[in-house]
Amino acid sequence: MSKQASFAFPTSAKLFLRRLISHWREQSAIIRTAADWTVLLYIIIPGGLLGGRLYYGFWNDVLPAWSKVLPFMTVPGLLVILLGSGGMVLLLQEGDLLFLRQRQDWISTIIRRGITYSLAVTTLKIAAAFAVMLPFIIRGYGLSWAAAASLFILTLACSWCVKLLGHIVKVQHQGLRRWLWQVPAVALPCGIYFRAAQLWSTHPSIVWITTVLFVLISLFAIQYRVRLRGTFMNDVREDYKQRMRIAGLMLRGVLDKPRPTRYKPWIFRKSQSLLSSKLPESRLSAAAIKALIRNPAHLKLYMAFTGVSLVAIFIVPAVMKWVVFIVLSSLMVSWLFSFWSLFIGDDYIGILPFTKEQKAEAGSKAVPILLMPYTVLSAAFVCFSIYDWWGLVLFVPIGAVVGIMVSRIFGAFRLAR
């Protein structure tokens, strides 16, 4: 006893409580960085009063007209979206791997209490969302209080099941396997929940049978999670990701999302050669092409601009399609040359002994190749909408010629030789 009293946290329960308080302080500090409590009070108090008056009106006044048009399955549909979002916080830290390595019972206690805390937070979220929908469920769709209570219990049991199974998948798998395992872990329970909510009126017993099934799976998942070994670093990484969700929401419009750690590229894993030529310029061009395709931010921007361009070409009149096509192709090639300048200015590329002429030659090869898919797709939209079946013959050569010509024109100004 005297030896335990010498520790700052003699029991695992006190250690977890200390971490929970630190977690709350961390979240409140993140919120305060965006707005002071004084500013928040000016928003919360009027918003609370206005929201309370609206909620009171939903119970006592006439419901909005739009609520009578929406079918009942809109309610479980919205709840399914809430069920599939969020995660769990176990309050594990990196130092536990060193200082609590010989105290596995402490780590198990922290995990159990973290699961309890996460499920309690999930319960509060579901209860708050259900309370907002309750006037429409009772008054709009005519459900009894007993039926509404059974739907709430079903929703709660499904949320526990989805959170636990989804967390287990996240800490055990990475990459494509994680997305594949999300289907039985998250999508399947949500689908069962949606189907059970759909059959509640004709088969009320299905709701309770499904609820019991979700509870049993949740209990099994808790025991499995406590006994799970070999996922400590993934647990810490998932904890950190969940703790930073509020900060991520606040910084979404300010900073780019950090790229996930990849141990292997998702494409061109064997670093195979893209171009037949073995010249240094060709190798540098191939490296630039791979760099754009492997970078999620650049690739998403490329695909997004392509999609917007195709929509713009489709909706403009026929007499304007070629003009819009040329202008948008010029914008795309300008962005690609900006990417090339960023790529060639990288510190790693600066180490390689490429001359200015070799870099310019590599850029004149890489940019047309990167531009070609965009111009060919855009030419297909132009040709099919104007020339009907003749477009099937024309769009590939026209797209290739436009891509090459626009690249050469811009390359004469953007590439320094």
Image (spheres, rainbow, N blue to C red):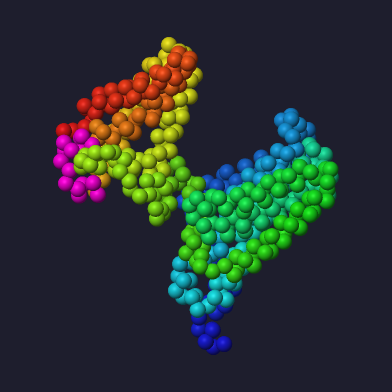
Residue 107: percent from left, percent from top = 55, 72
* Residue 79 drawn above or below residue 89: above
Residue 279: percent from left, percent from top = 20, 41
Give the residue at x 55% y 79%. 10
Give the residue at x 18% y 38%. 358
Residue 191: percent from left, percent from top = 68, 46
Q: Which residue ends up furthest to the bottom in the rendered image?
A: 2
Pick the residue in front: 56 or 218.
218
Q: Is residue 410 left or right of residue 90?
A: left
Q: Is residue 152 visible?
A: yes
State the quadrant of the N terminus: bottom right
User: Hey, which quadrant is residue 380 in on the image?
Assistant: top left
Is residue 349 covered in magenta? yes
Residue 271: percent from left, percent from top = 33, 48
Is residue 124 covered in magenta? no
Pick the residue in front: 186 or 392.
392
Q: Is residue 64 visible?
A: no
Main secondary structure of the magenta stretch:
helix
Give the residue at x 18% y 33%. 416
* Residue 265 drawn above or below residue 69: below
* Residue 91 drawn above or below residue 86: below
Q: Is residue 183 left or right of residue 392?
A: right
Pick the residue in front: 276 or 222.
276
Give the residue at x 30% y 30%. 368
Magenta-tinted stretch: 348-362
Q: Is residue 323 left or right of residue 240?
A: left
State the quadrant of the C terminus: top left
